[in-house]
Structures are given as C-alpha cells and as structure tokens.
C-alpha cells in the first residue's frame, strides 16, 4: 500500500474528499516525524509504538575491497507492534 492508496481508503472510510483525506494523512505523518525528531515516542494504542533508536559507531568491512572502514554513529526509527496488530497479522 502506498500513500495514495491510504489516502483513498481514509477518504472512503471517513466520507471525506480526497484532498481533505490527503491533508489528514500528511498531517499525521508530519506529526509523527516531528515527534521522532524531538526524540519523543509515538504510541498508537493497539497499533504500536515508534521510537528513535541510536546506533553506535562501529567498524565494518567494505564488501568491494575488504578494507576496514569506520561506520559513524546514527539514529534510526524503531517500531514495536501492539498486541492488536500482532493478533490481526497472525
């Protein structure tokens, strides 16, 4: 499912015009992004939780040359599914 498919589903479910549904979906995604950039956790009860995770710097190997390289520290997004989502998938 792509964003456009999600917008269509929201428009149909909520009986909204597609441009309003697009605004709603974009606002939700923007707020999740903003919260994660502030290192807040976003919890959607029954669906799951998004959180920022830190990856420490480490040493790796270049697959092309086999040379040792330094991989810098970075942040990534983690997702932990809620019970209702796990049950629906299984």
Image (cartoon, grey):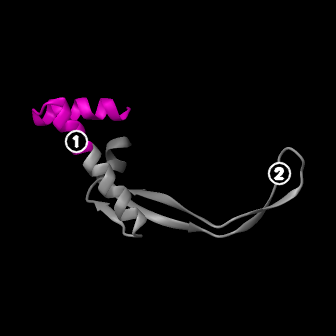
Q: Main secondary structure of the magenta part?
A: helix
Nearer the viewer's eye, disc 2 or disc 1?
Answer: 1
Q: Secondary structure at mark 1?
A: helix
Q: Is residue 9 magenta?
A: yes
Image coordinates of residue 73 in percent, x first then y, are 64, 67
Q: Assess whether mark 1 and mark 2 are in contact (beta carbons under 8 angstroms).
A: no
Q: Is residue 16 left or right of residue 2?
A: left
Q: Is residue 9 left or right of residue 15?
A: right
Considering only order in the chain, which callout, 1 or 2, is on the residue closer to the N terminus? 1
- The residue drawn where x is 83% and y is 46% is 63
Q: Nearer the viewer, residue 80 or 11?
A: 11
Q: Which mark is residue 23?
A: 1
The residue to which callout 2 is attached is: 62
Image coordinates of residue 37 in percent, x first then y, are 42, 64
Q: Nearer the viewer, residue 25 or 51?
A: 25
Image coordinates of residue 18 in percent, x first then y, are 19, 30
Q: Nearer the viewer, residue 81 or 26?
A: 26
- The residue drawn where x is 35% and y is 64% is 35
Q: Is residue 17 above or below residue 53?
A: above
Boundaries of the magenta span:
1-25
In three-dimensional space, the C-alpha distance between marks 2 and 1, rounded to whole angstroms, equals 43 Å
Q: Is residue 44 above or below residue 2?
A: below
The quarter of the rendered structure image containing the C terminus is top left
């Amino acid at each position: 499912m792509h964003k456009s498919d999600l917008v269509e589903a929201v428009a149909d479910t909520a009986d909204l015009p597609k441009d309003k549904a697009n605004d709603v979906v974009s606002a939700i995604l923007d707020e999740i992004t903003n919260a994660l950039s502030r290192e807040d956790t976003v919890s959607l009860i029954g669906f799951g939780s998004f959180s920022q995770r830190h990856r420490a710097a480490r040493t790796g190997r270049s697959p092309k040359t086999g040379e040792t390289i330094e991989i810098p520290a970075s942040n990534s997004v983690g997702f932990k599914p809620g019970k209702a989502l796990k049950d629906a998938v299984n």
